[in-house]
Image (cartoon, rainbow, N blue to C red):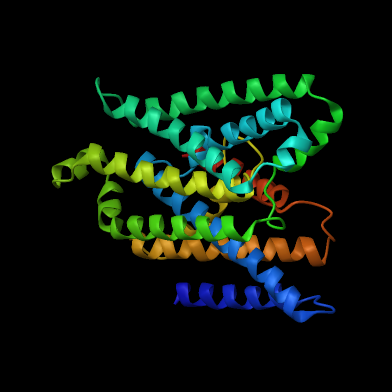
Amino acid sequence: MVLSLLALAVLVVAAAFMTVGVKGNWEFALAFRGRKLLAICVVASAIAISTVIFQTIAGNRILTPSIMGFDALYALLQTCFVFFLGSARLASVDNRLLFAVETLAMLAFSLALYRWLFLGARRGLQVLLLVGVVFGLLFRGMMVLLQRVIDPNEFVVLQDRLFASFNGVAPDLLGIATLVIVAVSLALWRLRGRLDVLLLGRDQAINLGLDYRRTVSLILILVSLQVCVATALVGPLNGFEPVSFFGLLVANVAYLLVPGFRHAHVLVGAALIGILLLAGGQLVLEQMLGFGSAVGIVTEFIGGVLFIVMLLRGMAR
């Protein structure tokens, strides 16, 4: 029942997003908004699904994949592009090449961390998260250093590249990202039973016969691929902060609204809630605020309030 209502709400918001405020050429407007809506659906579902699964593995509902430093690495890459190439030369570089470099760099970073975690000495997942936080701080420090010496005119261009934007998504990149994220989502969907077992904890999962290290490493790689592709497509929804408040907000609203614990229901609910919030927020910002802000600012504010409430509830217990 809840999933049906969420699906209906998504359809209503999608219809409003496609039609509200359209003037002039409907064919052009529908095609332009359709691409934007597809990008919103792809990115929102990718972040929602990856956050829920990451929290299942970590056993913590206030952590998101951003803690691994993906957004900080993306921001550092953009800073290096503008600093070393310049905005004029960067504008002439093929978007597909930039997309590939950004995705592969973030994916290579995550694979290096996972290889260090699962090979050799036994290390806990908490160590991986701590190392991710440290690298995230390192990337942010390097980024700030370069930004302090960059040309002011180039810095203005850089600022536009550091926040998520759905208006300039290239159709070919959108097609590639959609195929990758759909394929990864289907692979994660096939692992939903194992995710239910992982929700019981590491020791219980091993006692039930689950190959814990292999399963967790596979899921982390798939989650990283989703996050890397979504970030490379539109940029980080939360700027480059260590916690993705959009993912935090969507995941915890899904836990609250969707009954039960099974990932077959929670993942679908989280994806629908993510699309609903992101499409609805983008609609409000475009039609009511006239692009006077960014959807990431709204999600950071709401998600930040939720984050503080969750911390206070945890301290009260």
x, y percentage for residue 149?
78, 19
x, y percentage for residue 228?
50, 43
Quarter residue 268 falls in: bottom left
Quarter residue 259 falls in: bottom left
x, y percentage for residue 62?
50, 42
Residue plotted at (71% across, 69% down): 32
Compared to 293, does 160 lie above or below?
above
x, y percentage for residue 253?
52, 58
Residue 247 is at least partly visible in this image? yes
159 with respect to 139 (left or right) = right
Residue 252 is at least partly visible in this image? no
42 with respect to 295 (left or right) = left
Residue plotted at (67% across, 48% down): 164
Compared to 121, does 9 lie above or below?
below
Q: Nearer the viewer, residue 77 or 19?
A: 77
Screen quadrant of the N terminus? bottom left
Q: Nearer the viewer, residue 244 or 143?
A: 143
Residue plotted at (84% across, 79% down): 24
Report how many numbered discs are placed on residues in the image: 0
Residue plotted at (71% across, 29% down): 85
Q: Nearer the viewer, residue 188 or 57?
A: 188
168 with respect to 97 (left or right) = right
Q: Nearer the viewer, residue 105 or 225?
A: 105
